[in-house]
Amino acid sequence: RLLIVYPWTQRFFDNFGNLSSPTAIIGNPKVRAHGKKVLTSFGEAVKNLDNLKATYSKLSELHCEKLHVDPENFRLLGDILIIVLAAHFTKDFTPACQAAWQKLVGVVAHALAYKYH
Amino acid sequence: MVLSGNDKTNVKGVFSKIGGHADDYGAEALERMFATYPQTKTYFPHFDVSPGSAQVKAHGKKVAAALVEAANHIDDIATALSKLSDLHAQKLRVDPVNFKLLGQCFLVVVAIHNPAVLTPEVHASLDKFLCAVASVLTAKYR
């Protein structure tokens, strides 16, 4: 969804092959694999809520020094994740749940941007 | 950022699926916005912003009506919302960042009540539409 809703985010994924249409993006195995990586990392965050900066320290350095990703993109992805959760959990995604998760994606984005220099 | 023919079709499709629930969606979006982004409550010191509040329901209805109006006049949102644009510029002066926050909450509400409708493409079109509405509402700020 990130690559479809905010197509400029495709700039980081030149080596992913065919991203030329929503259908191509949805069917792209590299996109799927990367999504798994990202969500697995979120899972780590949820297990280490008291220690997010340390948890994301190496990934933060990577995103700054090697990947050169503007941290604004972490906020965009966080917002997209919220929509995916909402569609998946529907009524169970209560306002309180949304508020908590919106905070979580915010602090994860902050932790990922923390080592930028 | 320009709404393509596809975007316009997608947006109209969403609003026709929403149908008579638009008022409820507006209220729920506001409720979620106040819960998720508490700083937005600062624009409503005169309101009871607790969940289920009659004032929030009434305001949600207004917000929904404006979105429906914009969707019905999607080829010229600026003209359709001209009075609202003046109101926001001269009187309300809501900081532009807040339209993104309400937009996010409106998307969440649509996702919750119509997950099958909000395909990635429709999501993209609706997000663009909400950005376009926000642009119009802040167009006369300076």
Image (spheres, coloured by chain):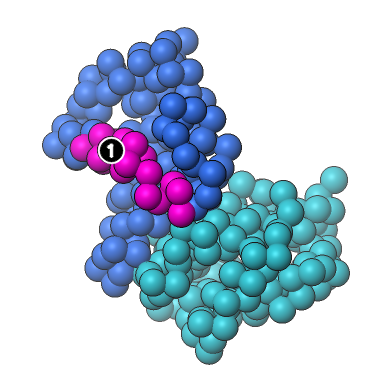
Residues B140 and A25: in front is A25
Q: Residue placed at 44% from the left, 47% from the top? A: A25
Q: Which residue lies furthest to the bottom in this view?
A: B20
The residue that mark 1 highlights is: A33
Residues B32 and A82: in front is A82
The image quarter containing residue A17 is top left
Mark 1 surroundings: few (<14), some (14-19) or many (≥20) residues within 10 A: few
Residues A47 and B48: in front is A47
Residues B107 and B101: in front is B107
Q: Which chain is blue?
A: A
Q: Residue placed at 48% from the left, 24% from the top? A: A69
Q: Residue placed at 79% from the left, 69% from the top? A: B75
In this rendering, is residue B6 above or below A26? below
Residue B8 in view, yes or no: yes
Q: Which amino acid does label 1 sit on?
A: Ala
Magenta residues (range): A23-40
A39 magenta-colored: yes
As drawn, is B96 to the left or to the right of B19? right
Q: Which chain is cyan?
A: B
As drawn, is B134 to the left or to the right of A32? right
Secondary element at image label 1? helix
Whole-percent x, y for residue A55 in the image: 22, 24
Whole-percent x, y for residue A61 in the image: 36, 14
Q: Residue placed at 80% from the left, 53% from the top? A: B139
Provide the chain ID for the residue under circle 1.
Answer: A
